[in-house]
Amino acid sequence: MSDSIQITPATGPLRATIRPPGSKSITNRALVCAALAEGTSVLTGALDSDDTRVMIDSLAKLGIPVEVSDDRTVLQVQGCGGKIPASAAELFVGNSGTTIRFLTAMVALGQGTYRLDGVPRMRERPIGDLVDALQQLGVDADCESPGGCPPVVVKATGLPGGRAVVRGDISSQYLSGLMMAIPSAAGAVELAIDGPLVSQPYVWMTLEVMKSFWVTLEATSDLTKFNTAGGQIYQTANYAIEPDASAASYFWAAAAIVGGSVTVEGLSAASLQGDVGVVDLLEQMGATVARRSDSITVTGSKLRGITANMNAVSDMVQTIAAVAMFAEGPTEISGVAHNRHKETDRIAAVATELRKLGASVEEFEDGLRITPGKLRGASVATYDDHRMAMSLALVGLKVPGVEIQDPGCTAKTYPEYFDDLARVVAS
């Protein structure tokens, strides 16, 4: 893809239907559960992206082969029955947070030395709290970069069991990684959450995916404690993966911004993915939402600013920020301090780029306040962050002259995004 892409404004209301590719979050969770299962599992509707490819590549280096179909949406995983085949591995995870966090916990079940590393930004993304939790459970694990950041080295002799306290305010992925690993521990394990738990819908998602592979984990209703007797072995499954709700958000937001309607197929209010909740926020902003058993349609209307705590749907902050540019009155987003530790500092990055486009943005430690102004075209940076590129492109559907730098960064989760966006606009 070229170094930049100019967004072509829509010429009229949208009338489109789309089914986005499979959920990244579900694909990588299902890959881990299938990898730990006894026998061969088949995953359908999988996402093909940088994040899922580094997961598949890492599993292969651990001795767990994944056969990929020609269109890369069907994955056949030969599970290891809870015993990691490789006794040593160097795993490169790019900038995939799910991959490094899930596999750091998973390799603790092995017998050997495993090193996990990624791109320079990954070496700035904290993982020390996960490593600390593993140490509490008797695992020899350590971070090589300052501040508890990767590379991570795990010298595993199996996961014996015990009790660990896990911070909940940085990333739910630490917890999800531990949740998937501990049922295969040699003994009983208890996890206790310290402080507020961010992105809770992703934790519920993890529990549901685990159940599909016949493993259960006792959890309190408020997700503050998790228990397992250990000794469980995942069983094989034929598992269908939902379309990615985070990816869908950009098309729903496009309808809210431009007008007209966009229907996303394959998702409903009962989705495993908490990010479908973005349509509730769009509805609060004035859009009309039609929820059906296998689709959700958003229809644009006059927009108004809202005040929203987006802790549970923090990946949707950039989407709502783009829509806020076209609302009447300010939009204030809070509860997302952990967004500063993602692919980039997403609070600072959004504030910087929206100001280029004409908005007045006040930045807080845990969010931001966006007041629309006289909008103008600009060349906007994306910080090697797929969500920056996909969300800021939406502004260009209504404002001429918006240029997206490094559009290829969307390959992390949605390589065909700009082609699909163009098709939706042209429908």
Image: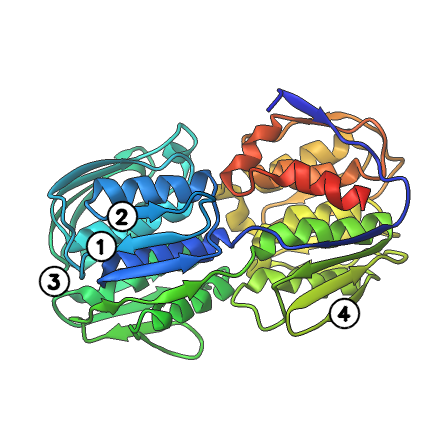
Which residue corresponds to the image point at 21% horizontal and 50% vertical from the top-left? 107
Give the CA distance from mark 1 to mark 3: 10 Å
Q: Is residue 297 left or right of residue 245?
A: right
Per the model, the C-alpha gap separating discs 1 and 4 is: 44 Å
Residue at 62% over, 38% down:
388
CB-based contact (under 8 Å), mark 2 and mark 1: yes
Considering the numbered disc 2 on the image, is that residue within a helix, a strand or a loop? Answer: helix
Q: What's the distance in space between the residues labelled 3 and 4, CA to CA?
A: 49 Å
Marks 2, 1: nearer the viewer: 2
Q: Earlier in the sequence, mark 3 or mark 4?
A: 3
SS type, badge 3: loop
The residue to which callout 4 is attached is 290
Quadrant for residue 420, please give it.
Answer: top right
Circles 1 and 4 in contact, beta carbons < 8 Å: no
The amino acid type of the residue labelled 3 equals Pro
Answer with mark 1 or mark 4, whichever residue precedes in sequence.
Answer: 1
Q: Which residue is mark 3?
A: 160
Q: Amino acid at mark 4?
A: Ala
Q: Residues within 10 Å of mark 4 (few under 14, many from 20)?
A: few
Mark 1 or mark 4, whichever is nearer to me: 4
Check disc 2 and give the amino acid type: Thr
Can you say whether 49 is above or below 120 in the image?
below
- Position of 18 relative to 149 (above/below): below
